[in-house]
Amino acid sequence: MAVKIREAERPSSLPEWIDRAITLAASAISIAALCVMFLALCGEVIVRYVTKSSLGWPTELPSFMFPWLVMSGIVLAAQHGAHISVTLLLSKIGRGAQRNLLLGMQIVAALTFFYLAWLGIEVLRVTSSEYYPVTGVSALWAYLALVVGFVALGITALTTFARLRAADDPLSVRAHDPEEEL
């Protein structure tokens, strides 16, 4: 069954295509993380109930899956403009000043997130030698979520910057309308 995308939803520019790819990836990661953690923990409960023993590995699973769930949620919030923001100043200034302020904010956000990703690479080097005892999975996988999330947030800031430059109404670029999801 093919999913039809309405003309208004079809990405028309490179920033919109990038945003769509980031949104799809973050959605897939969050759904996968939730499903894997839920199924593993349900299995652990069933095994404990039936055998009075433990599988062991499901107790470690949230340690390296939860960071992926959290970072994918943060990226989705940024993509949909559903994060917490203070707009008092934006509502008091003109459209041109709004655009300039928002453009400046995106530059600061992009630089900050790319810097945090760069710092996270050092954390990956340190944690790559640490392993969870039961699963043998490297702690690197948990911290990799931070680096990937910060890169996605930096790219989101850059696509927001590009979309702001082209938008008639700067406040509509990442405006989140809960009604459109119903």
Image (tube, rainbow, N blue to C red):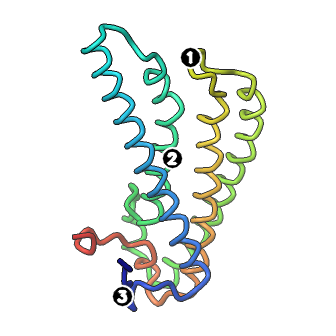
Q: Nearer the viewer, mark 3 or mark 1?
A: 1
Q: Nearer the viewer, mark 2 or mark 3?
A: 3
The answer to which of marks 2 and 3 sits earlier in the sequence is: 3
Left or right of 160? Residue 37 is left
Label 2 SS:
helix
- Image marks 2 and 3: residues in contact by CB distance under 8 Å: no
Left or right of 46? Residue 174 is right
Label 3 SS:
loop
Image point 78% across, 32% down: which residue? Answer: 125
Image point 64% across, 41% down: which residue? Answer: 144
Which residue type does callout 1 highlight? Val
**Alpha carbon separation for disc pair 3 and 1:** 48 Å
| Res. 120 mark | none
In the rendering, at what x and y percent does residue 87 appear?
38, 65
Left or right of 122? Residue 161 is left
In the rendering, at what x and y percent does residue 139 appear?
64, 28
Which residue type does callout 2 highlight? Met
Badge 1: residue crowd in 10 Å (few <14, some 14–19, many ≥20):
few
Question: Which residue occupies the extreme front position in the image?
Answer: 51
Badge 3: residue crowd in 10 Å (few <14, some 14–19, many ≥20):
few
In the rendering, at what x and y percent does residue 164 appear?
54, 80
Q: In which quadrant of the rendered image does the C terminus lie? A: bottom left
**Alpha carbon separation for disc pair 2 and 3:** 29 Å
Q: Is residue 139 above or below residue 148?
A: above
Q: Which residue in the protein does label 1 denote?
A: 134
Label 1 SS:
loop
Q: Which residue in the protein does label 2 denote?
A: 71
Q: Nearer the viewer, residue 78 or 45?
A: 45
Write down the quadrant of residue 15 in the picture: bottom right
**Alpha carbon separation for disc pair 2 and 1:** 25 Å
The answer to which of marks 2 and 1 sits earlier in the sequence is: 2
Q: Which residue in the protein does label 3 denote?
A: 6
